[in-house]
Image: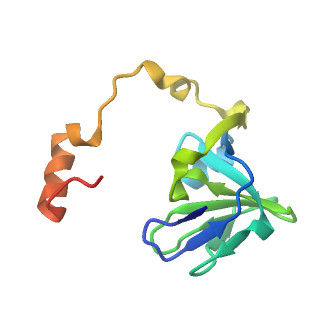
Amino acid sequence: MTGGCQCGSVRYSVEVADADAMFCHCRMCQRATGGVFAALKQVPRAAVTWITREPDRFRSSEIALRGFCARCGTPLTYEGIGDDSLDLTVGSFDDPGSLHPVIVVGVESRLAAWHGARDLPEKRTAEIPAVVRKWIETRGKVPD
């Protein structure tokens, strides 16, 4: 599988053995992603090839580094110091839909209001007039 950051300056290729991924609700993942959880795919470090360049890294705690693109800010990795594996952010994969969560971790920090939001109303991007107008003004169409 392949993936990378939003601007394309950090790209990777990775040998993936299965489609299993996870949600992590720990405070470190919340802060590192700016979201209420991180969606992650664990892989052996040796399975990852950085195609363009390695990500920049921030030591987020005594136990971990976070890989990211300093140019566009995309969070890319959770790297436990001394571990043989690392976690890639699911959203950074070119085909994230091929992965699926099989476990939820860090549940002690899960935000109850954001858990089980399946019954909320839904809208496609093309149903938000202000966003559609901006895409048409800048690109001539709404991206696929």
Give the answer, above or below, for where 57 lies relative to 87.
below
Give the answer, above or below, for where 57 lies relative to 19.
below
Q: Position of residue 43 (x, y in %)?
A: 75, 57
Outermost residue, top direction?
119
Give the answer, above or below, for where 127 lies relative to 50.
above
Nearer-the-camera pick, 75 or 108 = 75
Residue lying at 60% horizontally and 78% vertically, measured from the top left? 51
Q: Position of residue 137 (x, y in %)?
A: 12, 60
Nearer-the-camera pick, 76 or 31 = 76
Nearer-the-camera pick, 61 or 107 = 107
Q: How many marks?
A: 0
Residue 112 sits in quarter: top right
Q: Quadrant of the N terminus?
A: bottom right
Residue lying at 34% horizontally and 23% vertically, measured from the top left? 121
Give the answer, above or below, for where 81 lies relative to 34.
below
Q: Position of residue 89 (x, y in %)?
A: 60, 54
Residue lying at 53% horizontally and 71% vertically, measured from the top left? 69
Residue 142 visible from this viewpoint: yes
